Structures are given as structure tokens and as C-alpha cells.
């Protein structure tokens, strides 16, 4: 189970880095995939960059914790980070996004992150 726990944690951290990159360098398509399209040339541009920075930073912190602080710290980190996709679920729903995206992407991601935290705690 330890290999599964580490693998899932690393994949989730790398996924955060990918999302951060995408919001910083492909903001329009990233926003559409998020579930609430935005025009990066308009007022939303700064917010898309902020989201990119947030997601990328979460990935870097997650990897750093796993490497330098250990599995217990990563487990607590994952438990706390699960709030982000839960919040994203609400944001998509409150802004008229598709329920399929809100639940199928964001809520499902929160569940996977919580599973990752549980596996890490059990390792």
C-alpha cells in the first residue's frame, strides 16, 4: 500500500503543477476546462494567472513535503488541500458551470485527494 500511497501523492502533486502551467500559459482553454470560461484578455486574466500560481505552488509544496518532511506531513497536506477542489466545486456551481464538471471533475478530485491522504496516513 505504501507504493500506491506515494505514487498517488506524486501524481496528484504533478497534476497540480500541470494545472498551474496550463492556467499560466494556456489560460483560455484552462478556464474552459475548469468549468467557468473566462476571457484572459479581459479582467479575468489576472485571476487565471493567480489560479495558475496557486495550483502550481500546491504541487511544488506537496512534492517538497514528500521529499523533505515525509509521508505524515504529505498526508496532512493532502487532507488540507482537499478543500481546494471542494471549493472549486462550489465556484463552478455558483457561476452557472455544468454540474457534470463540478461533480465529475472537482468533487471527484476532492475524493481522490482524500483517498490519497488516507493512504498516506496508513503508510
Image: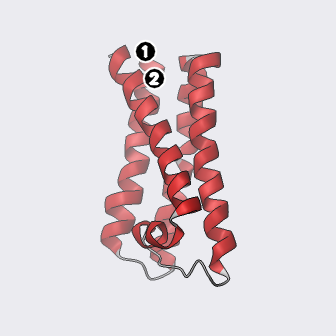
Question: Mark 2 = which residue?
Answer: 120
User: Neighbour class for label 1 at 10 Å: few (<14), some, many (≥20)?
Assistant: some
At 49% across and 53% down in the image, what residue appears?
A: 19
Please give the label number shown on residue 123. Answer: 1
CB within 8 Å, label 1 to label 2 = yes
**Relative to 10, is 100 above or below?**
below
Alpha carbon distance from label 1 to label 2 = 5 Å
- 28 vs 113, nearest the viewer: 28
**Relative to 95, is 18 above or below?**
above
Question: In the rendering, at what x and y percent does residue 72 appear?
Answer: 57, 19
Q: Is residue 24 left or right of residue 33?
A: right
Question: In the rendering, at what x and y percent does residue 112 appear?
Answer: 37, 42
At 66% across and 70% down in the image, what residue appears?
A: 47
Find residue 104 and report its image quarter: bottom left
**Relative to 17, is 24 above or below?**
below
Q: Is residue 17 left or right of residue 53?
A: left
Q: Is residue 42 left or right of residue 8?
A: right
Amino acid at each position: 500500500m505504501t507504493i500506491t500511497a506515494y505514487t498517488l501523492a506524486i501524481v496528484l502533486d504533478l497534476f497540480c503543477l500541470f494545472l498551474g502551467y496550463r492556467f499560466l500559459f494556456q489560460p483560455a482553454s484552462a478556464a474552459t476546462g475548469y468549468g467557468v470560461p473566462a476571457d484572459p484578455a479581459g479582467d479575468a486574466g489576472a485571476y487565471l494567472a493567480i489560479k495558475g500560481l496557486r495550483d502550481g505552488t500546491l504541487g511544488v509544496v506537496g512534492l517538497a513535503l514528500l521529499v523533505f518532511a515525509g509521508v505524515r506531513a504529505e498526508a496532512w497536506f493532502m487532507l488540507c488541500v482537499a478543500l481546494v477542489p471542494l471549493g472549486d466545486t462550489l465556484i463552478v456551481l455558483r457561476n452557472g458551470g455544468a454540474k457534470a464538471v463540478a461533480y465529475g471533475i472537482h468533487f471527484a478530485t476532492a475524493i481522490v485527494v482524500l483517498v490519497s491522504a488516507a493512504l498516506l496516513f496508513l503508510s
